[in-house]
């Protein structure tokens, strides 16, 4: 808590410098369907990720969402719990690019349980004014391999960055864990978790970093 208290004090004393920093959290307002990029990362089974979704959520397809679309730099944000149908289109960092035939394009419905931070390998670094190197404003970092996703989900030996299409879907109806009580909701852990079973309209998570004055 000391670094946070220190930050708040600095903000309090120097409001002039604090306000621009707060206003600079310019979250990305993305459409419910469009193009994005997809990377993948290792999420150990039963791991509690940034949103604080239950351990059992990891038994089904999940992904981390790039920070400025996720809507928080820490803990939970408005992206938490949302479900998206992600469909592979092509690789573009491979040489040559790879375009699987239309009938061999995998798709998967994921639930967002984690934050993919700005920085790092750059794929999660899009801002409202600047897309990532794939021209996308959202990156989905798929938890893969996963016991819930077939090993041949990626149709070539190149597991680089994929250009994908995404569509927000109804978790209850379309996510594999959508009717499994143990996979839904958040762990009981004070105030820093938020993982709606099927966020829509008024039950999406607020931004933890905005609410706590964290840039
Ligand atoms: C992604 O796919 C769309 C639709 O085919 C295309 O317009 C776009 O240029 C592709 N982007 C990349 C980075 O390959
Ligand atoms: C999602 O699907 C469930 C089950 O089919 C349905 O009861 C619910 O109304 C849907 N929610 C929304 C927001 O469409
Ligand atoms: C996901 O997208 C694929 C490819 O467009 C489509 O075939 C599939 O029906 C979609 N799944 C859902 C649940 O929307
Ligand atoms: C959220 O929306 C639903 C349906 O639109 C409504 O029944 C419910 O009272 C709302 N909850 C809050 C906390 O506003």
Image (cartoon, rainbow, N blue to C red):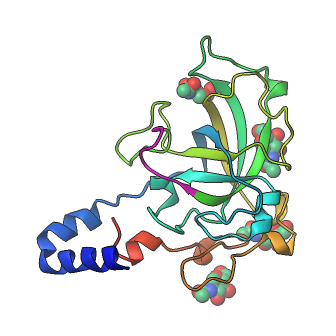
Expressed as whole percent of the image width and height from the top left, the position of residue 206 reads 50, 74
Residue 92 visible somewhere in the drawing: yes
Residue 117 falls inside the magenta stretch:
yes
Expressed as whole percent of the image width and height from the top left, the position of residue 7 reads 26, 73
Q: Is residue 210 left or right of residue 177?
A: left
> Does residue 173 sit above or below 92 in this rendering?
below
Residue 29 visible somewhere in the drawing: no
State the residue at coordinates (62%, 11%).
96
* Residue, far front: 2
Expressed as whole percent of the image width and height from the top left, the position of residue 130 reads 37, 40
Magenta portion: prevailing SS class: loop
* Residue, far top: 96
**What residue range appears in magenta?**
115-122
Q: Is residue 134 left or right of residue 210?
A: right
The one of 4 and 18 positioned closer to us in this rendering = 4
State the residue at coordinates (32%, 73%).
3
Q: Is residue 152 left or right of residue 36?
A: right
Res. 48 image quadrant: bottom right
Res. 1 image quadrant: bottom left
Expressed as whole percent of the image width and height from the top left, the position of residue 192 reads 54, 78
Q: Which quadrant: the C terminus?
A: bottom left
Classify the position of ligand 1 by quadrant: top left, top right, bottom left or bottom right. Answer: top right
């Amino acid at each position: 808590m000391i670094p946070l208290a220190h930050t708040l004090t600095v903000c309090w004393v120097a409001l002039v410098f604090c306000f621009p920093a707060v206003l600079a959290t310019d979250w990305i307002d993305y459409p419910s369907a469009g193009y994005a990029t997809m990377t993948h990362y290792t999420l150990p089974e039963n791991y509690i990720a940034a949103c604080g979704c239950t351990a059992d959520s990891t038994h089904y397809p999940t992904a981390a969402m790039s920070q400025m679309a996720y809507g928080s730099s820490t803990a939970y944000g408005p992206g938490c719990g949302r479900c998206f149908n992600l469909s592979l289109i092509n690789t573009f960092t491979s040489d040559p690019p790879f375009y699987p035939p239309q009938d061999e394009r995998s798709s998967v419905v994921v639930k967002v349980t984690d934050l993919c931070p700005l920085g790092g390998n750059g794929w999660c670094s899009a801002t409202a004014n600047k897309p990532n190197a794939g021209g996308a404003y959202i990156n989905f970092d798929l938890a893969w391999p996963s016991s819930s996703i077939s090993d041949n989900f990626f149709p070539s030996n190149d597991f680089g960055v994929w250009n994908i299409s995404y569509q927000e879907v109804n978790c209850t109806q379309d996510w594999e864990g959508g009717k499994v009580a143990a996979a839904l909701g958040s762990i009981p852990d004070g105030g820093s978790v938020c993982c709606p079973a099927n966020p829509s309209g008024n039950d999406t998570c607020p931004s933890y970093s905005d609410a706590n004055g964290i840039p």
